[in-house]
Amino acid sequence: MYAQLVKSEAAKTYDEMTPQERAFQERIDRGEKIEPKDWMPDAYRKTLIRQIGQHAHSEIVGQLPEGNWITRAPTLERKQILLAKVQDEAGHGLYLYSAAETLGISRDELLDMLHSGRMKYSSIFNYPTLTWADIGAVGWLVDGAAIMNQVPLQRTSYGPYSRAMVRICKEESFHQRQGYDIMMKMAFGTPDQKAMAQDALNRFWYPSLMMFGPSDKDSVHSAQSMQWKIKINTNDELRQKFVDQTVPQAKYLGLTIPDEQLRWNAEKGGYDFSEPDWSEFYAVIAGNGPCNGERMAARVTAWEEGAWFRDGLMAYAEKSAQRPSAAA
Ligand code: FAQ
């Protein structure tokens, strides 16, 4: 399982590149977008398929922890909002699968790789949503971390990915606000509600920090992905920005970030904070998190139980194509 975790080769210098690779790198350095029919190095294509595919899978697996609360949302309004959000995540998955398909891989192949454990999805979705406050924490922290990572990806070098990110970011920022709105209701509510909000923050803080990936020193792909502008920032840069943005938001809520080492560092103009437990991170991405089995079982069941519907759509498309009016 998760066989992709291999040390990638360091990025090539200009001198080590073939003339074709150099011309490609120069286009990227000039800020040009790479489009599906353009020549690209095989490794660029593979890296994009890996990253966009993982991202797409994260969106649809990410529906599960929130979908868990649709029937139990505390008011009709909250239920409608949550339904719309979970539906948005399916849409994000579709834009991203479409972007990945422009690289020459089919959606069926990508899903097969997810279902057989050959492709990853974000570690965060392997944690349970135990209370309604968790839905607030997911919106505030998980969507907050997702936006922090995805806003720069609007400038990623691959055209279809970059354009998908523009729309996704608009929707994610609404998602983040709805999560913060839930947190405000809870944190400014009864003592029990505030305690639930604090408990959700305690459980989601470190898993949210893990979303940005391992420390830069352990990141396998960052050097090459940044040279190709597939990634715009390092994992640690984005994690720092997320902490700096989120700490004042927690203070406003009257909640405490569960990190005794958290301090403002005037010299660096940001907070010092504790690293997540990286052994937990590696266990989760190796398939051993609290909900990995449950999440994969839900996705595989949905795929198998949806076979009749996919078959029906295909049969309808074939029949429509054979109609005389279609031929004309
Ligand atoms: N989880 O060398 P790096 C969302 C893997 S947002 C699992 O640093 P890279 C919205 C990594 O794949 C979440 N695996 O890797 C939403 C690699 O393994 P591999 C999705 C992780 O790619 C909100 C290995 O560790 N967002 O869904 C994670 O340069 C609420 C070494 O790491 C994106 O995917 C992780 N957290 O940087 C939906 C954003 N971190 O592939 C519903 C796009 C690392 O060699 C509800 N992706 N790994 O087997 C990226 O920006 C990058 O791929 C990173 C990782 C930053 C995630």
Image (cartoon, rainbow, N blue to C red):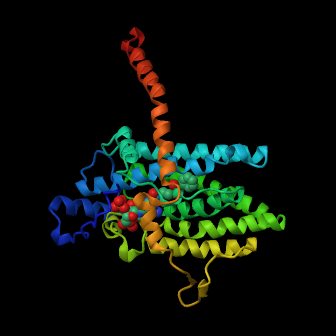
Question: Residue at 56% of width from left, 59% of height from top?
Answer: 127
What x and y, as percent, mark residue 228?
32, 63
Q: Quadrant of ligand 1?
A: bottom left
User: Where is residue 15, by image quadrant?
Assistant: bottom left
Confirm whether residue 60 shows in the render.
yes
User: Where is residue 186, by image quadrant?
Assistant: bottom right
- In the visual, does 171 lie left or right of 40? right
Out of 60 and 155, give the one closest to the viewer. 60
Looking at the image, the residue that sits furthest to the bottom is 267
Out of 54 and 176, give the one closest to the viewer. 54
Image quadrant occupied by the N terminus = bottom left
Image quadrant occupied by the C terminus = top left
Question: Number of marks in the image?
Answer: 0
- In the visual, does 102 lie left or right of 91? left
Looking at the image, the residue that sits furthest to the top is 324
What x and y, as percent, mark residue 218?
36, 74
Out of 75 and 297, give the one closest to the viewer. 297
Question: Residue at 55% of width from left, 64% of height from top?
Answer: 145
What x and y, as percent, mark residue 216?
39, 75
Out of 18 and 316, give the one closest to the viewer. 316
Position of residue 38 relative to residue 230, above or below, is above
